[in-house]
Amino acid sequence: MSKRIKTSLDGRFHFDPLLVFACSSLLLIGFVMVASASLHLGVKVTGSEFYYPIRQLMHMGLGLILGLFIAATPLRMWEKWGAWLFIVGLVLLILVLIPGLGIKVNGSIRWLSIAGIRIQVSEVIKFFSVIYMAGYVTRHQQTVQESAFGLLNPLILFSMACVLLLLEPDFGSSVVILMIAMGIMFLAGARLSQFIVLLGSVAVLVMLLVYFSPYRLKRVTSFMDPWADPLDTGFQLTQALISFGRGEWLGVGLGSGVQKLFYLPEAHTDFIFSVIAEELGLLGVVTVIGLFALLVWRTFAVGVAAEQAGQRFSAFVAYGLGIWFGFQSFVNMGVNMGLLPTKGLTLPLISYGGGSMMIMCCAVALLFRVHSEIAEINATSLNKGKGVRVQYG
């Protein structure tokens, strides 16, 4: 199921209507909710209530422009550049730690300023991780399936990336890129026994990082009982839970939320889902979850279709993007609902943020490129009578 438009770059481009619907709906909901959550903050910071909505609109516009270039680039080029892109990502992670280059916000050094635009390097490395791992498992399929070295080789580079991310510190993003790497290797056929050992090792490492880091340990303990200290360590979570409680079934109404008014920290970024819960209620929460479920389902459907068409690199790109979208959105929503300890991860395509929004638009554009190439392969095969069209979903 796809629609086609003429392009001057590469013949016909195929769109999946359901993917377009899910992504455009999330972008629209995100823009409206960011505006609702940030009008008062813009007045306080700059004197203009439209400061954050206008900047978010600019981020979306730049993301769509970058997405056009991403979607116009053949996948064979991404496969060729994969390893180099990951190395560039490591270099960026090093640069952001150099005093004077990295920008410190809320105690973390995660941003580089390029042409006046703040780029969150951790988002860039997630994007490059998907491309690199897809290329790796495509080139080393037999090694990944038969040898433990097939798992360890790429994880050395990913370990370097994680160490650099932890120095920022950005624990959440390091977990995301590890999930992307391990998820792709699992889908590529890595042995279950080796995978269990690897997961166990990662789990032990995560527990040690939490135990020996006072601020991470404080987050975990406050998560277990946020009401024990609701004005300090449990403040974020208790305010988020109050938002969900106030929303009830249909919410208090768009723009009528109270928690965003300097009660709920980072209401327009990490805790935007709580604002949705308060103003749109259970209906809004279920709608957003449903849209993310649709996005992840269609992403994996594209991956399955690519694998059936014999395009392994394309398939693993789609799988990696699906893991990224699904895991990061799950963590963000889980944190907002008190199911997981607080982590500084944005809600994809919804939260305010230049780097996050632009990279997410690029990731979606890459997914559209995968779908378009597979749809074109299927269409060409049918025209030549060489195959049966792969059905999505």
Image (spheres, helix red, strand yellow):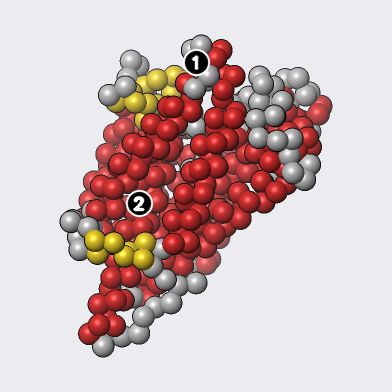
The number of numbered discs placed on residues in the rendered structure image is: 2
Position of residue 297 measured from the top left corner of the image (x, y, whole percent)? 52, 63
Asked if residue 185 is positioned above or below residue 242 in the image, the reply reads below
Q: Which residue is mark 2?
A: 365
The kind of residue on which mark 2 rests is Ala
Q: Is residue 93 left or right of residue 43?
A: left
Q: Nearer the viewer, residue 298 or 104?
A: 298
Q: Residues within 10 Å of mark 2 (few under 14, many from 20)?
A: many
- Asked if residue 335 can be seen in this view, the reply is no
Verify CB contact (< 8 Å) between mark 2 and mark 1: no
Position of residue 241 measured from the top left corner of the image (x, y, whole percent)? 75, 35
Q: Which mark is residue 48?
A: 1
The kind of residue on which mark 1 rests is Ser
Q: Which quadrant of the view contains residue 66?
A: top left
Residue drawn at x 29%, y 25% as measured from the top left: 114
Asked if residue 23 is positioned above or below residue 209 in the image, the reply reads below
Residue drawn at x 55%, y 53% as measured from the top left: 292
